[in-house]
Image: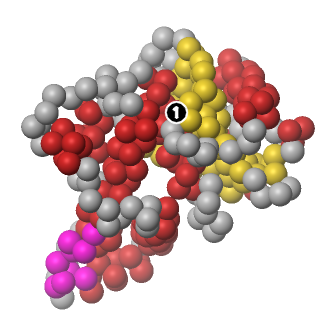
């Protein structure tokens, strides 16, 4: 039996089917001996399943010729229309499922460099919402029952003092949160749910762009994002509520986030 030191990299290799067969027995033994890594493997597997379920309808679709030419450098890169940028976000997630993270996300990120920072923030927030808001068992990494740890953990990882807004007055209760990639940075996602099972999410990350705010919808009839970029951070509140209702909830959440960051 092969004996060597394993790491998180091997977890990704195992999930992608790239771990050598003669190392599998030792790898399984390593997982059993390291509960933290075994839990991480279980979480990564759940994330993979969630991505596959979220994009099952497009996994087998052919990449449009015009986008393939852009990726291969056969045509000049131009600023994409909102609907095209949404396709790129979906395509990135599909490729993540099909072939692992690899270097593709770095390449796809380059295609959107001409897009405004606020659009990138909104698209990332909407993509995360589409994937995780539909999840029941694996929507969050840390539940609301461990709120203090959730806030401390996300604050330390994102680099901002994050306080989960209390949206009880708006009819929403905190479900929990998770850590997500956001370009070259990291983002915190907080998930909320009302009595009818309707969910909204808050996506918060560091952002160096100038102050701005607005609303953004990536696809017809899809979730909408109300976003702000201010004082070195970016925040987007995402949901499928009526626009006025979402704006009201977002304003409440934003004011509490600002207060938390300033305290």
Q: Residue at x 67, y 43 (%)?
A: 239
**Residue 162: % across, % down:** 64, 33
Q: Residue at x 90, y 38 (%)?
A: 169
Q: Residue at x 34, y 82 (%)?
A: 28
Residue placed under numbered mark 1 in the picture: 122
Q: Is residue 17 magenta?
A: yes
Q: Quadrant of the C terminus?
A: top right
Looking at the image, residue 220 sits to the left or right of residue 176; the answer is: left
Give 210 or 246, whichever is nearer the viewer. Answer: 246
Quadrant in the rendering for residue 40: bottom left
Q: Residue at x 65, y 23 (%)?
A: 261
**Residue 77: % across, % down:** 21, 29
**Residue 241: % across, % down:** 74, 42
Q: Is residue 142 magenta?
A: no
Q: What are the residue bounds of the magenta stretch?
A: 16-24
Quadrant in the rendering for residue 7: bottom left
């Amino acid at each position: 039996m092969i004996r060597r030191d394993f790491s998180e990299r091997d977890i990704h290799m195992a999930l992608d089917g790239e771990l050598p067969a003669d190392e599998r027995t030792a790898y399984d033994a390593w997982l059993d001996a390291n509960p933290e890594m075994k839990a991480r493997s279980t979480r990564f597997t759940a994330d993979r399943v969630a991505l596959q379920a979220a994009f099952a309808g497009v996994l087998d679709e052919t990449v449009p010729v015009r986008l393939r030419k852009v990726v291969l450098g056969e045509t000049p890169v131009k600023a994409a229309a909102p609907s095209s940028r949404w396709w790129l976000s979906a395509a990135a997630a599909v490729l993540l499922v099909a072939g692992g993270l690899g270097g593709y996300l770095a390449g796809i990120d380059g295609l959107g460099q001409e897009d405004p920072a606020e659009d990138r923030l909104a698209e990332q927030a909407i993509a995360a919402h589409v994937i995780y808001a539909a999840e029941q068992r694996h929507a969050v990494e840390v539940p609301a029952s461990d709120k203090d740890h959730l806030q401390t953990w996300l604050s330390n990882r994102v680099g901002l003092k994050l306080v989960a807004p209390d949206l009880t007055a708006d009819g929403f209760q905190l479900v929990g949160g998770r850590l997500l990639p956001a370009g070259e940075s990291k983002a915190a996602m907080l998930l909320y749910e009302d009595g009818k099972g309707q969910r909204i999410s808050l996506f918060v990350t560091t952002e160096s762009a100038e102050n701005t705010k607005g609303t953004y919808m990536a696809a017809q009839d899809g979730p909408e994002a109300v976003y702000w970029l201010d004082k070195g951070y970016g925040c987007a509140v995402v949901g499928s509520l009526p626009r006025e209702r979402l704006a009201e909830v977002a304003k409440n959440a934003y004011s509490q986030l600002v207060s938390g960051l300033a305290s």
